[in-house]
Amino acid sequence: MKSRWSDAEARQFVERYAPRWGEALALRVYTSRLIGADPDLVMHGGGNTSVKLVKENLLGERTDALCVKGSGWDLDSAEPQGFPALDLGWLRRLRKLNELSDEEMVNQLRTRLFDASAPNPSVETLLHAFLPHVFIDHTHADAILALTNQPDGAELIRQALGERIVVVPYVMPGFRLAKLASQMFDYDPGADGMVLLKHGLFTFAADARTSYERTIEYVDRAERFLRSRLRGRSAPSSRATEANAASARMAQIGPVLRGLLASPSGNPDQPHRRVILEHRATPEILGLLDDPQCASLAARGPLTPDHVIRTRAQHLFIEHPRLDDLEAFRKQLSAALAAYRTGHDAYFAAQVREKRVTRTKLDPDPRVLLIPGVGIVCSGKTRKDAAIAADIAEHTLRIKEMAELIGRYEPLEPSDLFDMEYWSLEQAKLGKEVEKPLSRQVALVTGAAGAIGVATCVELAKAGAHVVLTDVDAEGLERARQKVAQAAGAGACTSARMDVTDEASVAGAFEHACRTFGGLDIVVANAGIAQVSPLADTDVRQFHKVVDVNLGGYFLTLRAAARVMRAQGTGGNIVINASKNVFAPGADFGAYSASKAAGHQLGKVAAVELAPLGIRVNMINADAVFAEGDTPSGLWREIGPARARSRGIAPDKLQEFYRERNLLHAEVTGTHVGRAVVFFASNQTPTTGATLPVDGGIAAAFPR
């Protein structure tokens, strides 16, 4: 491992932050980002850093302060405000106490903040405070954990890192750990580093660069020590072609897995508590999963205690998966999940009985599944949560394998893992988060590049759904994806070019959704085209083209949606964007009106057929939507002038004509249509086979 320190970059951070925050905190931010940028050192909020400095209060009094990484901040994106400042003198006085509960520790930290609006300081704040050094860096370096998580971890650390390291036995993070670690340092005040067994590495110094580079030095020593112990041995590997096959398998088994991981919600209007899946299948991962010892390693605990909150104590390994037979795989997976859940329930019951504590039991489902031939599959309430679990699982799999090659991987005891998984501070968070109406759901929208399509995608994403945008227009599709990403975050959406008239293209887009998120819960059939001409003058090829898109496209979309949702077994919602023309057609619009009416009827048939599966199918009849912000309607851009001629009005008066003809004199927007989609998709009423007009009120088009 090499130092990434750059004098030029350090000066830039000082120039940017020192005028307001001071040079010490500016450099603290810089080296924190250097650490956070390397996943071999820390991952997703793991690790913490601090700096001691002097602050001036409102009375002009100078006070010793500790600035430590706050909750909710990752090192790779650190900013000065992410390091809440506390009264250092008071924190150090707490060392006199014999005991301090976690709840009271948090209270003491908050009451000693210089800024009451600052984020909660790290749970390891007192450890940073009790040590005397100005700069302190704490990481969960992979190479260090490969050594500490061994039966003789303390001895291996001393051999690898030398004598200037204090080795601290595992203790739950908090006051007890802070007091023990500081006492052990007192016995060896010349040490410049500290290893917490089965937890991580601390380094410290009087300046930012030295503390950071000591981290790099000790991790490099650990890496070189590991390489010397491996002596040419290496983990199994797989071929790239197998990784491609694994991706195809995920598209097939994703809905099955996602359906089995869904749990009853207790809410009859939203009966299923779904999950989002993340899939990883590099050649290295597939090789590791094929290793005969992988099942044993999966059953052993995480690398470091805080990982248990993201990945659970055990990963679920599926031995000899029946990937050749989907129904056989479903039964195999169902049995494996049932056994895992039973095991978690027994673990919970045993721990609360032995510890004589009261805790709220978490759901018993695995967060990480290891499936040979498929890869790592992780679940979470959002794509971000699932991806974090997958990142950790990848590192865990690799480091466990390395640890096993040099000795025997030994995790924390179940009692220690329970203390972290069911930590009172984590339990206090339960029930406080209010989820959005479409949270944990995945939606696919056709024609997403157009005005109605992009607005519908944005409204679905704002309601909590993960959105798959599809369209035949690749450039417009990317612009639409960027709009959704801006509204809800890049992780909430993905895109796939899809031609709704091409069976293979439709299948490919739905497979992309299943690979990316695990399945689908909401499908919006929206893609459509139009053609303006009297029936007597309509070219038969143009007529067939309109029907192919507006009716054939709806058929292929409905069929693909039904197949995915049937495999999941958790119901779903399909919404068809029909048209006001279904009930009130206009002259010179025969191909469009007929195809939309046929698509509307197809939706009613689907509502009848799919109701036994819990799948609702509803229609929206919208009137003309000309644009959504800076996204024009491709349909109206093409047919607008011709429709104006058919109605005998000037093209620039067309929008006004459509607005004035409805009862409310309302301009119909894509957002209005999107909100109607969200209404159906969120199961506000027990409705299927219904038609909802979004047209400002056109009497001739009232549903009948």
Image (spheres, rainbow, N blue to C red):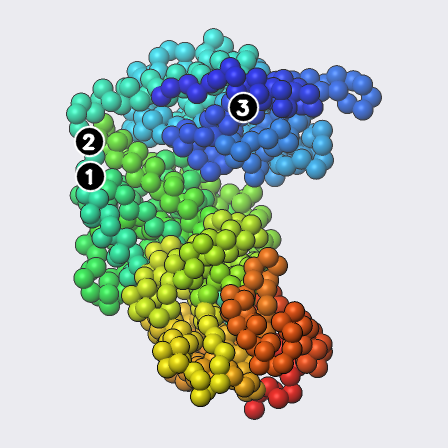
Q: Residue furthest right?
A: 59
The three-letter amino acid code for the residue at tag 1 is Ser
Helix, strand or loop at label 1? It is loop
In the picture provided, is 682 more to the left or to the right than 298? Answer: right
- 589 or 362: nearer the viewer: 589
Q: Earlier in the sequence, mark 3 or mark 1?
A: 3
Q: Earlier in the sequence, mark 2 or mark 3?
A: 3
Residue at (58% x, 22% y) in the render: 13
The residues tagged by marks 3 and 1 sit, at their Cα atoms, a distance apart of 37 Å
Helix, strand or loop at label 3? It is helix
The three-letter amino acid code for the residue at tag 3 is Tyr
Residue at (41% x, 69% y) in the render: 570
Residue at (19% x, 31% y) in the render: 234
| Crowdedness near tag 1: few (<14), some (14–19) or many (≥20) residues, C-alpha within 10 Å | some
Q: Is residue 183 above or below residue 170?
A: above
Residue that carries the numbered disc 2 in the rendered image:
234
Rendering coords of residue 455 (x, y %): 56, 62
- 547 or 538: nearer the viewer: 538
| Crowdedness near tag 2: few (<14), some (14–19) or many (≥20) residues, C-alpha within 10 Å | few
